Image (tube, rainbow, N blue to C red):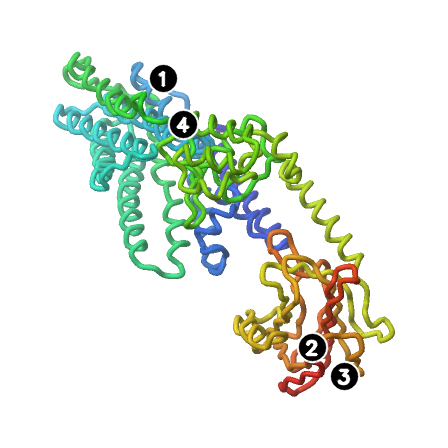
């Protein structure tokens, strides 16, 4: 009874976990919890990129997760509903096949996630060994009653294994196989169809298992066709549809699991295939089917060993997510350097060409660690054939090979993410403390002073947080030289760039007195707040610019029109050298008034 109920228990437990995760996602507003529970992988930046960088089609994603949760619950129910104990599988070949089938089920459920952390070529080689052996053994274990069908199934197994070997070989840098050869993978559908015919004739497998197998064949072919069609049509929902189609492999997993369950003796006598034990020729051909494609994947010694190629899965945590040296395990530091060394950024070529092996790149890297200056490092890059030798080596990559050397010039590169965030928070707090209210005698209903961290080119913005920012505002400010407004966005130009200034914002219920003394420039413009949330963006590490503290909402009266008065001055004697005061109050005029232009 327990063996029969186990599937229901596992499926029910899975649905309970999904329901709890869904509640947590609703409460926290973070869809990552229910995503992880349903899809069995964390919601990463790579997945968000598949959906266009954000879940703009959130209702579609939620619907897809619901469909996937139901299908996976059914899959778990089928996989873990174990058959009653019988007399045991008939023969050693059936025992071995059953073990391989269960290993294949484990691969479909979770092993593929673990092997996915290996280099792609090794991952594909392991999968080829498992599935190649399984498909050949499946052919030999079925009671066919027809030598022609068995020969056809064996040929299909050979073709499918060859296709898997080519997929693995295509992962080797510098190896590119003709796309037409990849069509050989379609023979997998033929192999499964022939096996299903054999299962129906064999008698050990139920009609339900055979029907599920046929459904998985049809579903797989429809999914492949749909992926091709969706890929040709660029629609907003295309990435979401492609992702769901890629996850709908549950039917094949159920067929494999049920095929393993029903290999136990159901009580009837299994009749061996005519001719008894396979001939020596057939056994030799079977071994050849498994071994020859795998031997073809072995590279000659003259080929460089390229383990990491920059933007592949195993490198993304350093090249895409920018994992720091302090957060990298010691055994992964050489790997991190190799990933950086072969990564491309837009049109910027990698540091080293792919004609160099891992060992050669590591050797060049250690020579750069010992080089006295950047000029010598550039010379080493040139000798290695680098396309970016004039730029020199990236220190945030070299730190993974020689942290002590890099720490002399850039000690911050050795810190972890937590340490970096703590240091950044300390720096922001100290910089904020250097700024003071330039008009303390006039208190506003809402006000605050903070440092504003400028990016390249300088300038800062003030906009309605409920509206998309208006790019035209920057162009208007650039033409004006001081303040520009476009709709609900304003931009103020600064005298400096790439350093902090002091910024004070004040919101009044009516126009405050005009104070010009001590200021270099003063101007007033009109701005619209459609949502009633008008303010200055806050600084966060990686953004490049923003206020060092959260500044208040300046739309004191809610949605409507406001006047924006901006004061600016520069004085080398002040702590940060540049100071701005922004005053906001209700006003319907859109006219610009310059009270004090920049002195000539």
**339 to the left or right of 592:** left
**Crowd band around label 4 with a 10 angstrom C-alpha radius: few (<14), some (14–19), many (20+):** some
Residue plotted at (38% across, 40% down): 250
Q: Nearer the viewer, mark 4 or mark 3?
A: 3
N-terminal label among 3 and 1: 1
Question: Alpha carbon of mark 3 to alpha carbon of mark 2: how far?
Answer: 26 Å
**267 to the left or right of 119:** left
Q: Is residue 273 above or below residue 173?
A: above
N-terminal label among 4 and 3: 4
Q: Which residue is mark 1?
A: 87
The quadrant the C terminus occupies is bottom right
Q: Is residue 585 above or below residue 39?
A: below
Q: Nearer the viewer, mark 2 or mark 1?
A: 2
Question: Alpha carbon of mark 4 to alpha carbon of mark 1: how far?
Answer: 12 Å
Q: Is residue 395 above or below residue 91?
A: below
Residue 83, numbered circle: 4
- For this rendering, which residue is in front, 471 or 257? 471
Q: Contact, CB < 8 Å: mark 4 with mark 3?
A: no
- For this rendering, which residue is in front, 374 or 567? 374
N-terminal label among 4 and 2: 4
Q: Quick one: SS at disc 4?
A: loop
Residue 599, numbered circle: 2
Percent from the top left, x then y, of residue 521? 71, 76
N-terminal label among 2 and 1: 1
**Crowd band around label 2 with a 10 angstrom C-alpha radius: few (<14), some (14–19), many (20+):** few
Q: Nearer the viewer, mark 3 or mark 1?
A: 3
Residue at the farthest right position: 441
Q: Quadrant of residue 87?
A: top left
Q: Which residue is mark 3?
A: 511
**Crowd band around label 1 with a 10 angstrom C-alpha radius: few (<14), some (14–19), many (20+):** few
N-terminal label among 3 and 2: 3
């Amino acid at each position: 009874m327990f063996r029969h109920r186990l599937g229901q228990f596992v499926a029910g437990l899975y649905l309970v976990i999904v329901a709890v995760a869904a509640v947590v996602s609703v409460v926290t507003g973070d869809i990552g919890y229910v995503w992880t529970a349903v899809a069995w992988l964390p919601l990463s930046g790579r997945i968000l990129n598949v959906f266009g960088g954000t879940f703009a089609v959130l209702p579609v994603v939620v619907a897809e997760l619901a469909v996937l949760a139901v299908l996976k619950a059914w899959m778990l129910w089928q996989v873990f509903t174990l058959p009653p104990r019988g007399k045991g599988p008939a023969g050693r070949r059936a025992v071995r096949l059953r073990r391989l089938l269960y290993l294949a089920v484990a691969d479909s459920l979770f092993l593929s996630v673990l092997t996915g952390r290996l280099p792609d070529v090794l991952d594909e080689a392991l999968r080829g060994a498992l599935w190649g052996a399984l498909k050949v053994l499946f052919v030999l274990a079925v009671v066919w009653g027809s030598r022609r069908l068995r020969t056809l199934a064996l040929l299909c197994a050979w073709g499918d294994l060859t296709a898997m070997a080519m997929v693995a070989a295509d992962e080797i840098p510098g190896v590119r196989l003709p796309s037409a050869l990849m069509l050989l993978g379609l023979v997998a559908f033929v192999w499964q169809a022939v096996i299903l015919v054999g299962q129906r004739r064999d008698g050990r497998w139920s009609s339900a298992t055979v029907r599920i197998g046929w459904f998985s064949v049809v579903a797989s072919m429809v999914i492949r066709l749909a992926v091709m069609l969706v890929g040709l049509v660029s629609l907003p929902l295309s990435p979401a549809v492609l992702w769901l189609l890629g996850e709908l492999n549950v039917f094949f997993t159920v067929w494999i699991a049920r095929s393993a369950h029903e290999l136990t003796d159901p009580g009837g006598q299994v009749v061996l295939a005519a001719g008894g034990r396979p001939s020596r020729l057939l056994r030799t051909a079977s071994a050849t089917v498994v071994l020859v494609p795998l031997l073809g994947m072995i590279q000659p010694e003259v080929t460089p060993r390229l383990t990491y190629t920059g933007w592949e899965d195993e490198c993304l945590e350093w090249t895409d997510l920018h994992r720091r040296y302090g957060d990298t395990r010691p055994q992964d530091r050489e790997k991190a350097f190799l990933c950086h060394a072969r990564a491309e950024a837009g049109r910027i070529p990698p540091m080293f060409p792919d004609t160099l092996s891992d060992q050669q790149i590591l050797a060049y890297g250690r020579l750069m660690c010992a080089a006295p200056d950047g000029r010598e490092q550039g010379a080493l890059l040139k000798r290695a054939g680098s396309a970016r030798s004039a730029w020199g080596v990236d220190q945030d990559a070299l730190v993974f090979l020689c942290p002590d050397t890099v720490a002399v010039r850039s000690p911050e590169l050795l810190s972890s993410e937590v340490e970096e965030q703590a240091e950044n928070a300390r720096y922001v707090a100290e910089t904020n403390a250097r700024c003071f209210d330039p008009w303390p005698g006039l208190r506003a209903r809402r006000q605050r002073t903070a440092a504003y961290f400028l990016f390249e080119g300088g300038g800062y913005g003030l906009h309605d947080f409920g509206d998309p920012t208006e790019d035209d505002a920057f162009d208007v400010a650039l033409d004006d030289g001081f303040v520009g407004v476009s709709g609900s966005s304003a931009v103020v130009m600064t005298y400096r760039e790439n350093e902090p200034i002091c910024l004070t914002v004040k919101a009044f219920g009516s126009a405050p007195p005009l104070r010009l003394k001590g200021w270099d420039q003063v101007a007033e413009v009109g701005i619209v707040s459609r949502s009633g949330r008008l303010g200055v963006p806050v600084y966060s590490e990686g953004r490049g610019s923003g206020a060092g503290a959260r500044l208040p909402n300046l739309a004191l009266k809610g949605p409507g029109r406001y006047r924006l008065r901006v004061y600016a001055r520069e004085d080398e004697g002040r702590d940060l050298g540049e100071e701005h005061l922004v005053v906001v109050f209700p006003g319907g005029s859109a006219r610009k008034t310059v009270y004090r232009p920049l002195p000539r």
